[in-house]
Amino acid sequence: MPATENAFISPQSIQTAYAVTSTANTDLDDAPTTVELLMTAGANGARVTRITSIPRATVTATNVQLYLSKDGGTTKRLLETILVAAHTVAATTEIPSYDWGFSEDNPLLLEAADALYVGQGVSTGSVVTTAHYGDY
């Protein structure tokens, strides 16, 4: 959609995407080998307002990594990490969810076709990372 100077453009379609990681990614350079595609921004970019990660199996402490690719996945630049604490998943325990800190007031703005990938630092139980966003 063409932009109108000095006019606010809101996201045109609301999206939710997720990725599941379980294998260690210890390669933090621009070519990590064990990461999963979380989402790709639309043709006019995207506004990410929430990303969360939650273990779905017993985990040891691990970092979860967020990467940005601006070239179709060839180069993945480390953008942010969070720590998921060790937790035993059981029917009698609450499973903690970890918020990455993006919000309506602090969105992650992506250009057209930018892609987000996730990885985790330790091979442990699987972690589900979910992105809530809108394509422009």
Image: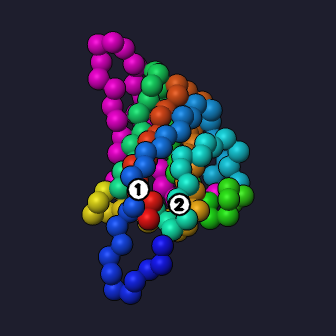
Q: Can residue 95 be seen in this view?
A: yes
Q: Position of residue 108 (x, y in %)?
A: 42, 62
| Residue at 27% from the left image edge and 63% from the top image edge | 105
The stretch of residues the image draws in magenta is 76-101
Q: Quadrant of the C terminus?
A: bottom left
Q: Which of the two discs, 2 and 1, labels the residue nearer the N terminus?
A: 1
Which residue is under mark 2?
42
Left or right, 70 with respect to 55, comes to right
Q: Mark 2 and 1 residues: CB-CB less than 8 Å, in contact?
A: yes
Q: How many labels does the image show?
A: 2
Residue in the image at 32% along x and 63% along y: 106
Write the residue at 56% across / 35% down: 21
Q: What is the secondary structure assignment of the residue under circle 1? A: strand
Circle 1 crowding by C-alpha within 10 Å: few under 14, some 14–19, many from 20:
few
Q: Residues under labels 2 and 1: Cα distance?
A: 10 Å
Which residue bears the numbered disc 1?
13
Q: Which of 82 and 43 is in front in this view?
A: 43
Residue 100 visible at all? no
Residue 55 lies in quadrant: top left
Above or below, comparing residue 10 to residue 126 in the picture: below
x then y, percent, for residue 67:
56, 54
- Is residue 87 in the magenta section? yes
Identity of the residue drawn at 39% across and 61% down: 12
Task: State whether the magenta stretch is mostly helix, strand or loop.
Answer: loop
In the picture, measured across the screen, residue 84 lies left or right of residue 41, that is left
* Residue 48 place in picture, x, y as percent: 41, 57
Q: Where is residue 13 in the image (x, y as percent from the top left)?
A: 41, 56
